[in-house]
Amino acid sequence: MRSRASLLLGAALLVLGAPLRAQDVLARALDLERQGRWQEAATAWRVTLARDPSNAPALLGAERALTALGQRDSVLAMVGRALAVDPANGTAHSIEVRAARAAGGDALAAEALARWMEAAPRSEAPYRELVRALLGQGRVDDAREAVALARRRLEDPERMRPEMAQVEAAAGNWPRAAAEWRAAAERQQSLAGAAIFSLQAAPPNARDRLLRSLTEADSTGVARRLAAELLLGWNEPARAWTLLRAALPADAEGRGEALRSFADRARAQDGAEPQHVAGEVLEALAATVGPLEAARLRVESARAFAAAGDGASARRVLRTMAEDPGAPAGTTGTATATLVELYVRERNPAEASRLLERSGARLPGGEAERLSRLVARAWIAAGALDRAEQAAAADSSLAGDEIRGWVALYRGDLARARTLLRTGVRAGEGEAAAERAATAALLQVVGADSLPALGAALLLAARGDTLGASRALAALAGGAGGTAGAGAGEAEILLLAARYAALARDTATALSIWEDIARRHGESSAAPAALLGLARTAAQRGDPAGAAARLEALILTYPASALVPEARRELDRVRGLVPRS
Amino acid sequence: MKRRTFLGALAATRLALRTGRATGRSIGAVTDGPSLLVPMDDAQTNHLKAYGIAFHAIERDGRSEWLLNYRGGSFLLPDEPVARRAAALAGVTIEPVSAADVVGIRGTIEQNNMDALPLERVPRVAIYTPPNAPPWDDAVTMALRYAEIPFTTIWDPEVIGGRLHDFDWLHLHHEDFTGQYSKFFLNYAGAAWLADMVQRNQAAARQAGFADVPALKKAVAERIRDYVANGGFLFAMCNATETLELALAAHGVDIAAAFADGTPMAPDAESRMDWSHAMACQGAHLETSPGIPAFSDIDGHQVNNAGRRQPLGAYELFNFSAKIDPVPSMLVQCHRQVIPDFYGLTTSFTRRTLKPADIILAEEPGAPWVKYIHGDLGRGTWTYFGGHDPEDPQHQIGDTPTDLSLHPTSPGYRLILNNVLFPAAKKRELRT
């Protein structure tokens, strides 16, 4: 049935052959291949080759389809027709070699190669095919001989440099491989990528000798840039940048390209050193381009410096841009926003506020509000609630309400905080949203409308003093029972105290509070969370049995708790049933 | 328990069960008193751990049943506190059922394409894996660990030393039985893991007195074939399937590249393959290039063969008659009929290379390949499942390991676990 269908298709293609464009036939054949309809694909390729016997894609397609059908040798007839039209056709010869190797092994392949060499006496292609095959079989010495033969026959010792480089690399002669690649790339710069790809695999103990052969006294810029790129790949960015800086191309385009590529690779690496180097490279690149591109590169450079922990360099770059009276508004706006973010990250809300007041008018509305909220949060973290409220005063959005909600909470005005944070829950996502939802849930359990002690304790946590927050919350819960006003929320406040103690690495306190919750507040929703905390601590301390006992108690005692799925996953982890993530 | 053991008991068991049903009492089955139904349809919240619950119930008192095609292939277990506790901890859904409920279930089973198979004794499970293999790189190891089903790991020295016969069930994963290190030798040259693999395999070959790794692996393949022929249950995935077939068919010819044994593949290797010695495949064409990590055209997807790589589709499980074909029925119990495909060094099996007696358990409709196959050899059976990891369709070397607690209802992993429980079934005569 299938063969009949393919015959019909072949006939249809022949009949319709004239109006169909060659590209359509090629596309159709490729589509048939993708569907695994090899017989029909082979027919389609045959049709193409009947019209154009030396069509390279069709020859390769026929080889694929016939190989899949187990009829690889059938391709030889098509190869013969292609070579009758074009005796030096490299694609046809290479297919012939492969088919010969598959059919009769090395002897037949050697005959096919000999025919190719005779038909194209000045071509490197047959020798390349030979070297590739020999390397594929691990016959490194034979591959070296093949390169030498090519050079003799082609009467040019400079030929086949990339092939010889691969031979040397396969033999572990890395300095010689580097020397071959150096010579090849100096003749043809587009080979630099291949050289880096090949030499990058050198083992650590061979790298210095390899680099020496690229940076000898008579080395060109091409070779030195190869060395720089290799060093960067081996995670030595500072050394690489020193080398590159002294070997940049003289022409502006080449220089820009080299810097851009180097900066991109450095930026993609983790760690302070590559990020700092990226900052330096981008700054150097900015000096070579027009004002708009330069502004973008300088912001990128500042971000790289900031990521490297070098705030001073980041600020230097950004301040120059933000304070440049002649710069376009977009440039100063971007620089201002990035600088404000940097000050916030450095916990310097005063400087961030000053900059925003001075230059905020030049920012688009939404951006100015976003930055104001960032500054407000920085003021909260500094404990200056009035300044935080003031920073967000002009922001009437839900996000602005959230800032006011946090300020109310830290002042102990739980009623106002309850309203504003509940409204704000609709905005934002991720960790901040989870924190907000947890706080809103706590406020629902703690019935009081005003509890300054709770606000003060939570403000300590917001300022980074989690140990102080833990102690204050524990004290508040201890004195609760109605007098302090926490009422029914005692277990939840204790749970928060334990969480902050754990964050402050005061494990003993955290454990003691969790045990207390499990013992005295077994009916509360905090109890399963306390058991989970106890289990995780036991697991971290190398006590999987203790952890498993806690988790089993959680699952069996509180089957309806929302923490049960997480407890089951944790139980799988402590038992080694799933990988640790 | 080898296949012959329950083959011998088949007629009597079926008769006894039928008699038991008629009188309201059953031999070797869970019928007296309240029971626990472990549903395996969408009501189940953790299908994978359900197999572990069933396994341990059988281990405790050997009175459990596999209700083929009933609510996704449910289990009926004795109602014991220990089973309830284990299910609660594992998050496995159970439904307590009375004796009257069980009678109703049996009536439904009797009237439909369903059957109740007694599960009597847990199989002794062996996983063939190198000693240094990370546990998270083999789907079966992961599934068994997650379901808490015990197993023993063995490798070449144990196989050559004759220990296979200590086990009822043997699993092979991505071992290359052609001895060519999955043909990663050229593409991953210099990688520490590859160097370690080469060194370990060469040491194993030397220790066992073989000239090279391909010779060792051929001998291991022969032992595995003997194991099946003598009544063992073999389950293989990924390229263990294809390379085992190639190694068996190549018992008299060199099909390994020069990097593996110092000599290139025999020029006439393909014509000298003895497919009568293979278990599942025939007439395959060999991949002759040592640089292409593919072995033959047994695999339909050719994931690492740039010119021939095929896209992933979905595979569909066959429906078998539970009462007439219980073995294939057991192997395809699942809560999904159509499942997304996943790559492996061997992803699928081309129809052209299958032997006529092979039973196709799952296929991609319209495609020239199938996914999941099964067959008999002598007194044992083999089952092949293409692909590496059902929940990591594009698996790459170095990928983050799959965490099955994030995939507790995985239909692909269920198929693996069907295989583990299948030797526990008291088997009736095959009519396939």
Image: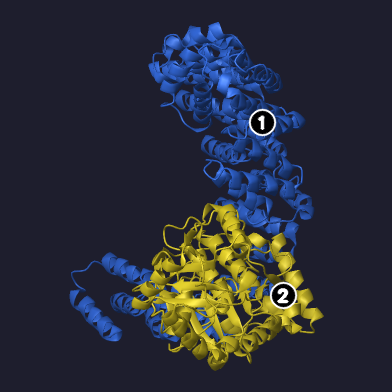
Q: Are marks 1 and 2 in contact (CB under 8 Å)?
A: no
In this figure, which colouring scheme has been used for the structure?
A: by chain
Circle 2 Cα neighbour tier, 10 Å, few/some/many (<14 / 14–19 / ≥20)? some
Q: Which chain is blue?
A: A
Vertical placement of residue B416 versus A361, above or below: below
Q: Secondary structure at mark 1?
A: helix
Q: Nearer the viewer, residue A553 or B2?
A: A553
- Specify the amino acid type for callout 2: Trp
Q: In the picture provided, is B74 more to the left or to the right than A235?
A: left
Query: Residue at the spot x=60%, y=55% of the render?
Result: B85
Circle 1 Cα neighbour tier, 10 Å, few/some/many (<14 / 14–19 / ≥20)? few
The image position of residue B368, as x and y in percent, is 39, 77
Residue B348 visible here:
no
The label number, if any, that marks residue A400 in the structure image: none
The label number, if any, that marks residue B155 in the structure image: 2
Residue A264 visible here:
yes
Quadrant, the N terminus of chain A: bottom left
Which chain hosts label 2?
Answer: B
Q: Secondary structure at mark 2?
A: loop
Vertical placement of residue A408 versus B404, above or below: above
Q: In the picture provided, is B238 more to the left or to the right than B162?
A: left
Q: Nearer the viewer, residue A233 or B210?
A: B210
The label number, if any, that marks residue A520 in the structure image: 1
Mark 1–mark 2 Cα distance, whole angstroms, equals 54 Å
In which quarter of the view is residue B352 placed? bottom left
Total marks shown come to 2
The image position of residue B304, as x and y in percent, is 52, 67
Image colour assigned to chain B: yellow
- Specify the amino acid type for callout 1: Arg
The image position of residue B298, as x and y in percent, is 49, 79
Q: Nearer the viewer, mark 1 or mark 2?
A: 1
Query: Residue at the spot x=59%, y=27% of the render?
Result: A492
